[in-house]
Image: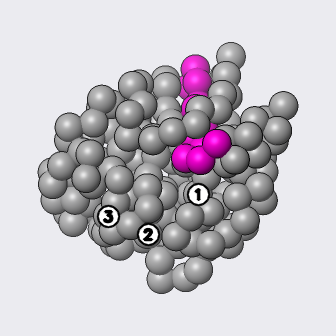
Amino acid sequence: MLRITVRQGDITTFQGDAVVNAANNHLVLGAGVAGAIRRAGGPSIQEECDRHGPIAVGEAAITGAGDLAVRHVIHAAAMGDEPVSSDTIRNSTAASLALAAAHELKRIAMPVLGSGVGGFDLRESAQIMLAAIRESPHAAELEEIVFYGYSPAGAATLEAIMR
C-alpha cells in the first residue's frame, strides 16, 4: 500500500529509488529544484537530458542520477513552452508515476511541481498532485512517495494537505 509522507529540506539528499525534478520541457537544469539536482548530481544528468529533450509539456523523462543517492531522476515537465497550469501539473505527475512503475521504482521523492520558478500556488499544486496520485493506476505499484517542502512553512503546508 502506498505511503505518502512529507519531509522538510533538500530533495537532493533523498535516499531511495528516484527523485522527481520540477523540469521544463527542454530538460535544461537551470534554477530551483532542477539547478539543485544539477549541482548535487553532477554534469552527467544534464548530458543525458540533452539526449532526451525536448519533450512535451505535461510529459516526463527518466535519466540516471549522477552523484545523487538514488538511481534515477524523473524529469516532470510541468512548464516550458507553455506556462505551468493545473493540467500540466496533473499530466506531468501522472507521467512521472507511469515512468516510476515502468522502471520498477518503489520509493520516490517529489517536489511540488510548478510552485517555485513556475510561480504556481504551492497549496493548489500539491492538491492537484495528490489527486493525480490517487487517480493513477500506477500509484499502487509504488511503496512510498515523499513530498519535499524546502522551507519549514512549505513542509507545514504539505503536512496539512496530506492529512
SS state under label 2:
strand
The residues colored magenta run 139-152
In the displayed structure image, the side of residue 101 where residue 1 appears, left or right: right
Q: Residue at horizontal 49%, vertical 23%?
A: 106
Instruction: Identify residue type, mark 2.
Output: Asn
SS state under label 1:
loop
In the displayed structure image, the side of residue 28 where residue 86 appears, left or right: right
Distance, label 2 to label 3, CA atoms, is: 8 Å
For the N terminus, the image quarter is top right
Is residue 143 shown in magenta?
A: yes
Query: How far from the left and from the top, in percent, is residue 143?
Result: 58, 20
Q: Residue at horizontal 81%, vertical 41%?
A: 161
In the displayed structure image, the side of residue 33 where residue 35 appears, left or right: left
Query: How far from the left and from the top, in percent, is residue 98?
Result: 53, 42
- Please tell me which of labels 1 and 3 falls first in the chain: 3
Q: In this figure, which residue is indicated by the disc labeled 3?
A: 29
Q: In this figure, which residue is indicated by the disc labeled 2?
A: 24
Q: In this figure, which residue is indicated by the disc labeled 1?
A: 113
Viewer-side residue, 141 vs 48: 48
Asked if one can make out residue 23 in the rendered structure from this viewpoint, the answer is yes
Viewer-side residue, 119 vs 65: 119
Circles 1 and 3, Cβ within 8 Å, touching? The answer is no
